[in-house]
Image (spheres, rainbow, N blue to C red):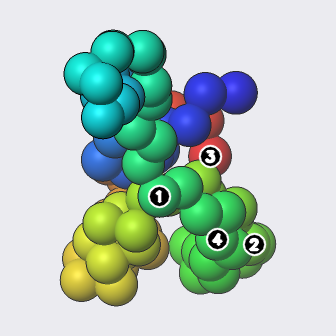
Amino acid sequence: MSAHCMLTGARPGFGNHISFSHRRTSRRFDPNIQSKRYWLPSEGRYVRLRLSAKGIRTVDTIGVEAAVARIRARGGKV
């Protein structure tokens, strides 16, 4: 599974390594993806979400119920 956030949709970015001699080679900028378990009171169960660090802060702000609703609205499976 690719490194992407279920909530914010953050995906890897691509660019170049540039050496001292200025030779360019491809590289990948991965988002800071963490797997986190949240209690979902409406369903009476835990859900495991793969979130970026920004996504975790968003869940802390809006709450897990609203976050799961956004993920499902985007077509994600929780």
Mark before the other along the chain sequence, 3 or 2:
2
Q: Is residue 19 above or below residue 71?
A: above
Residue 40 as seen in the image, left or right of residue 48: left
Res. 2 image quadrant: top right
The residue where tag 1 is placed is 32
11 is higher (above) or lower (below) than 23: below
Task: Write down the quadrant of residue 45 in the picture.
Answer: bottom right
- Decide: few, some or many residues near mark 2? Use Cα within 10 Å; few <14, some 14-19, many ≥20: few
Marks 3 and 1 close (CB-CB < 8 Å)? no
**Pointer 4 residue:** 36
The residue beneath circle 3 is: 78
Task: Tell me the element at label 4.
Answer: strand
> Type of residue at label 4?
Lys
The residue lying toward the viewer, choosing from 9 and 30, is 30
Q: Residue at x 64, y 71 (%)?
A: 36
Distance CA(mark 3)–CA(mark 1): 20 Å
